[in-house]
């Protein structure tokens, strides 16, 4: 009979302890973080992804496009430029470019319609491993 009484006491103490823990956690929901701490995922520098940044063309242009330029601070890569119309259909795609600018020839520039808002981006690679700039807009007057 005594062993039954000890088990009951142990169960009560354990139950009260767990209720106290649940209550304290409920009152401080971001436990175990301090109030001023924001949890963040930190990625090692080797995993940091870099993206190309488009420079020109951008905005409204009074002349035809003579060159597409972008900034890339990583290792040298092969790039391609894609120009889209307002419906996001491809008007022009470059071949592989080894630098950070591309000058389309006259026949390629003829595909760009004046008075229309156009979009372009630069990319390298394929599929999920593709590095790609933001979409940049420009218009030819």
Image (spheres, rainbow, N blue to C red):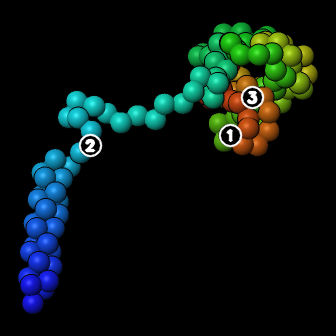
Q: Residue 8's quadrant in the figure?
A: bottom left
| Residue to which mark 1 is pinned | 88
| Nearer-N-terminus badge (2/3) | 2
* Of marks 2 and 3, the one in the foreground: 2
Q: Residues within 10 Å of mark 2 (few under 14, many from 20)?
A: few
| Residue to which mark 2 is pinned | 32
Callout 3 touching callout 1 (CB < 8 Å): no
Is residue 100 shown left or right of residue 17? Answer: right
Secondary structure, mark 1, is loop
**Residue 110, x across and y down, in percent:** 84, 23
| Residue to which mark 3 is pinned | 123
Callout 1 touching callout 2 (CB < 8 Å): no
Q: Kindly tell me whether residue 92 is visible in this rendering.
A: no
**Residue 94, x across and y down, in percent:** 86, 26
Work out how far the residue at label 3 is from the one at label 1, CA to CA, in angstroms.
16 Å
Q: Residue 80's quadrant in the figure?
A: top right
């Amino acid at each position: 009979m005594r062993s039954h009484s000890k088990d009951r006491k142990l169960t009560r103490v354990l139950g009260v302890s767990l209720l106290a823990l649940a209550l304290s956690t409920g009152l401080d929901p971001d436990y175990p973080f301090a109030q001023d701490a924001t949890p963040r995922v930190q990625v090692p520098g080797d995993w940091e992804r870099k993206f190309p940044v488009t420079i020109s063309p951008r905005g409204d242009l009074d002349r035809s496009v003579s060159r597409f330029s972008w900034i890339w601070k990583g290792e040298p890569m092969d790039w391609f430029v894609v120009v889209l119309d307002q419906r996001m259909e491809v008007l022009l795609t470059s071949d592989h470019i080894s630098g950070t600018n591309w000058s389309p020839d006259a026949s390629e520039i003829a595909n760009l319609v004046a008075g229309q808002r156009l979009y372009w981006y630069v990319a390298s690679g394929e599929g999920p491993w593709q590095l790609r700039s933001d979409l940049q807009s420009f218009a030819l007057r």
